[in-house]
Image: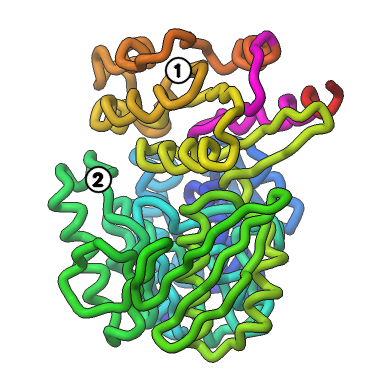
Amino acid sequence: MNNLETYQKFYFVGIGGIGMSALARYFHASGKNVLGYDKTNTKLTQLLMSEGIDIVFEDVINEKITSLEKEKTLVIYTPAIKKLGILDYFNENQFEVLKRAKVLGLITENTDCIAVAGTHGKTTTSTLVSHLCKEADLPFSCFLGGISENFKSNFLFNGTEYSVVEADEYDRSFLNLSPDWAVITSTDADHLDIYGDKNTIEEGFRQFAALVPEDKQLFVRKGIDIGRAHKTYAVNEEADYFSDNLRMDYDKIYFDFHTPTETVKDFVWDVPGIHNVENATVALAILHNLGVDFETLKKAIANFKGIKRRYTKHIYPSGKIYIDDYAHHPTEINAVVGSIKTFYPDKKLLVVFQPHLFSRTRDFVDGFAESLSNSEELILLDIYPARELQENFEGITSDWLLEKVTLDKKEISNLSEAFNKIKEKEFDILLTVGAGNIDTLYDPICEWLGNN
């Protein structure tokens, strides 16, 4: 293929995806002509269009496509799209067609790449690393899997010496990267439709770890066997880098940070959750190793606002608390609910959960049932299918999952009826959680709780 610099036009097939949109913004910021297709018009695609990117929502071979010159156009697609007439057109006419992960990998070859991998925690950690880089004014670009509340985007261009990327294990995409620094937050079983079993996904992470040239630049959460020498990090237990002395004061979290040679006391931020302090620990470790001083890092941690849909919390004058989170795996739900129970042990918790994928519901049904049983009341939404079809997963339904949940107060709802059901409930804390389109409840809930 040609060098990326030789292409003048970039066509994104599935441009509305969180990872795809970051790449689209990168090329647009580089002065390239960017256009693309997506099935659904969302807030994110509307933002891209407002930035000057041309997007269509119909699978039609229009004049803008037929006028593209294959020598000057690179087509980028996401593996989530299995069949599409537009993609067929580009392949049949011998355009250069590459997966998103391959293109991201080519970008990382020419930068000092910091790659954050893990079945849980990678979005928060990569966004936090990016925020710290920005506050330290390092010359970097970032490609994130979530929307930073600080810079209101999943992409930021502040130079080309470093790149910060969220390293996605789905479809083994992260093996396309060229990481100089890397984080591995977790290797729990997930994406079993790709990997088959836990041992195979763990092997995938070991292959990713092997891409990092220096042992001292690979940071792995303590307790994970990654098959090579590395630096460890942890919370509330000793490691190469660790945090402890966690305490909460007026909704702020305080903690102390330890390197192999020193202790820095009283980091403070507004982001709840022990798991988030763990993410902060490894972000601080990397920036410290890049030479950023602790005074800068303390200020940066203090003004970090988090990521949309990652423990997004609102407290209302009525005393009610609303938390919205992207968690879609039992381990993630346990982390969110566990943090709520730790900091608000006497509050009544209502959980509204939308399962994501029939296959994931099938593979982890007992784990979901156990994690959802830790609330006081549950509204369980229909399964969000994404790329899957119900006909291929007979019997895998939310009713089947609900039977396994041990709560007395539990019920099924479709998304359209969920908001009215929520308004009828008694609760101190409301948690909406899931990776599908449950986020459409966010604005109505915020408006309702703000007016009551």
Locate residue 167, reporting x and y percent.
39, 63
Q: Quadrant of the N terminus?
A: bottom left
Name the residue beneath numbered marker 1.
382
Q: Is residue 423 above or below residue 330?
A: above
Task: Identify the element where label 1 is drawn.
Answer: loop
Residue 134 bears which disc, if any?
A: none
- Apparent side of residue 321 relative to residue 272 in the rendered image (left or right): right
Q: Is residue 251 above or below residue 6?
A: above
| Magenta residues (range) | 424-447
Q: Quadrant of residue 371?
A: top left
- Apparent side of residue 373 relative to residue 325 in the rendered image (left or right): left
Q: Quadrant of residue 51?
A: bottom right
Q: Amino acid at mark 1?
A: Asp
Q: Quadrant of residue 292?
A: bottom right
* Front residue (pair 178, 442): 442
Task: Identify the element where label 2 is drawn.
Answer: loop
Q: Amino acid at mark 2?
A: Ala
Locate residue 123, reporting x and y percent.
49, 56
Q: Nearer the viewer, mark 1 or mark 2?
A: 2
Q: Is residue 53 visible?
A: no
Of the numbered discs 1 and 2, the one sitting upstream in the chain is 2
Q: Confirm whether the magenta stretch covers residue 426.
A: yes
Mark 1 surroundings within 10 Å by alpha-carbon count, few (fewer than 14), some (14 through 19), many (20 or more): some
* Front residue (pair 440, 75): 440
The residue located at (32%, 19%) in the rendering is 390
The residue located at (56%, 79%) in the rendering is 264
Q: Is residue 83 visible?
A: yes
- Apparent side of residue 6 relative to residue 394 in the rendered image (left or right): right
Name the residue beneath numbered marker 2.
189
Gap in Å between the C-alphas at discs 1 and 2? 23 Å
